[in-house]
Amino acid sequence: MAVVLDKDNHHSHDNTKDESRTNAYPSVANPTNKTDSEADYRAKADAQRKNFFSWLRFIALWLVIGLLISQFVLQRNTVFGDSMLPTLYSRDELLVEKISRHFGGIARGDIVTCRSYLSHQGPDTYIVKRVIGLPHETVEIREGHVYIDGELLPEDYLAENVVTRPIVDDFRKVKLAADEYYVLGDNRSQSQDSRYFGPVNKKDIMGEVLIRFYPFSRFGRP
């Protein structure tokens, strides 16, 4: 008996076997894509780390600059007390520059901050006073006024009817040395100054008051 083969069925059977072989080995994801993703992540992490350390260096640099400026150039000071009325009021905020004092820049009439020579105040306490007498000058307090080398000192910055009286007899008349300054408060009756503790050494003068920056209503050079 003759046997007839169904060619279509034969091919279909072969295709099924081919599909089975193909499905038995599913495709694997391209390993190159995974490698690229990890590289991108590492690159982003490195960039963030570099950016962080860049900002850290920037902040550290400005902190150092700020400390250097505060130590050698400018310093903020607050006024406490009424010894400089009516020029300065208690709680006024001042900016003090420290450079000019090293180059002979301290002049008569300048308002300066200097180390306190008062025994009840610590060595790191600074006071605000006005420079009256300069090195090598003779300062004398008499008749309610200040005399420099025998000449009456005009003091237009004082309030009306202010009388300057000596406090300690030893400092009623003083001959200043090469590195000494005589300082007084503008509110003479309420100020402990060179009339009380004597001349101030140049090394104990921090600097000159540059500007009053607070309160804003009195902003400006005092």
Image (cartoon, rainbow, N blue to C red):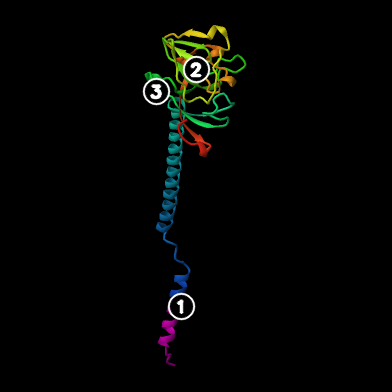
Q: How far is the residue under mark 3 from the one under mark 2?
A: 17 Å
Q: Residue 109 at x, y = what percent?
A: 44, 22
Q: How far is the residue under mark 3 from the one under mark 1?
A: 99 Å
Q: What numbered label is drawn on residue 183?
A: 2
Q: Residue 36 at x, y = what percent?
A: 40, 55
Query: How packed is label 1: few (under 14 Cα within 10 Å), some, or many (20 or more)?
Result: few
Relative vertical location of residue 211 with respect to residue 203 in this rendering, above or below: below
CB under 8 Å between discs 3 and 1: no
Magenta highlight range: 1-16
Residue labelled with disc 3: 100
Residue at left offset 57%, top offset 23%: 83
- Residue furthest to the left in view is 103
Residue labelled with disc 1: 16
Q: Which quarter of the figure has residue 57?
A: top left
Give the amino acid at mark 2: Val
Tell me which label, 1 or 2, sits earlier in the chain.
1
Q: Residue 79 at x, y = what percent?
A: 55, 28
- Residue furthest to the right in view is 120
